[in-house]
């Protein structure tokens, strides 16, 4: 199991920015697919962004594309989610996830085997 710890959440106003961090208990994150998911009250957990295990290729959900940026720092064993132009509908608990490369879509939660405890992001209008 890979231990993941998210941080950086908080309460902000619409249009503001936040940067979430996910620290992992592995030395080589490039061997794993890292992803961010979020879950709002009463809603299903949804895909936000992921980065491939063997490259810097990233994918984003349509709702965040152009506003959020995922990056990976292998030296620090950390992935980041830079969130700009935040909207009230971005309010959710954000979870970091890790998984090994497989044929399962990285946009699907089933592709990940390890999850962090989550960090709350609240955006007021």
Image: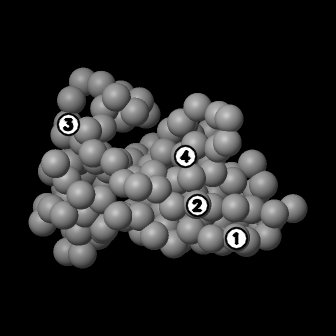
Q: Residues within 10 Å of mark 1 (few under 14, many from 20)?
A: few
CA–CA distance in space, label 4 to label 2: 9 Å
Specify how the rendered protein is coloured: one colour
Quick one: SS at disc 3?
loop
- Residue 44: image location, x then y, percent: 58, 31
Q: Which residue is mark 4?
A: 38
Q: Quadrant of the C terminus?
A: bottom right
Q: Nearer the viewer, residue 71 or 46?
A: 46
CA–CA distance in space, label 2 to label 3: 28 Å
Q: Nearer the viewer, residue 2 or 51?
A: 2
CA–CA distance in space, label 1 to label 3: 34 Å
Question: Which badge, 1 or 3, comes first in the chain's sequence?
Answer: 1
Taking 36 as reference, is 123 above or below it? below
Q: Which residue is mark 2?
A: 120
Q: As drawn, is 25 to the left or to the right of 81? A: left
**Circle 3/circle 4 CB separation < 8 Å:** no
The structure residue drawn at horizontal position 76% and vertical position 56%, both measured from the top left corner, is 87
Q: Nearer the viewer, residue 60 or 99?
A: 99
- Residue 15: image location, x then y, percent: 78, 67
Question: Which badge, 3 or 4, comes first in the chain's sequence?
Answer: 4
Quick one: SS at disc 1?
strand
Q: Which residue is mark 3?
A: 101
Q: Which residue is mark 1?
A: 11
Question: Which badge, 4 or 1, comes first in the chain's sequence?
Answer: 1
The structure residue drawn at horizontal position 25% and vertical position 63%, both measured from the top left corner, is 24
Question: Which badge, 2 or 3, comes first in the chain's sequence?
Answer: 3
Q: Is residue 121 visible?
A: yes
Q: Image quadrant of residue 41? A: top right
């Amino acid at each position: 199991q890979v231990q993941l710890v998210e941080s950086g959440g908080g309460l902000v106003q619409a249009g503001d920015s936040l940067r979430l961090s996910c620290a992992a208990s592995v030395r080589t994150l490039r061997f794993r697919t890292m992803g961010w998911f979020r879950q709002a009250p009463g809603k299903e957990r949804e895909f936000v962004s992921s980065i491939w295990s063997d490259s810097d290729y990233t994918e984003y959900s349509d709702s965040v594309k152009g506003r959020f940026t995922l990056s990976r720092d292998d030296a620090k064993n950390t992935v980041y989610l830079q969130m700009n132009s935040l909207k009230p509908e971005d309010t959710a608990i954000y979870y970091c996830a890790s998984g090994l490369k497989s044929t399962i879509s990285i946009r699907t939660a089933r592709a990940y085997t390890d999850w962090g405890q989550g960090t709350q992001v609240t955006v007021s209008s």
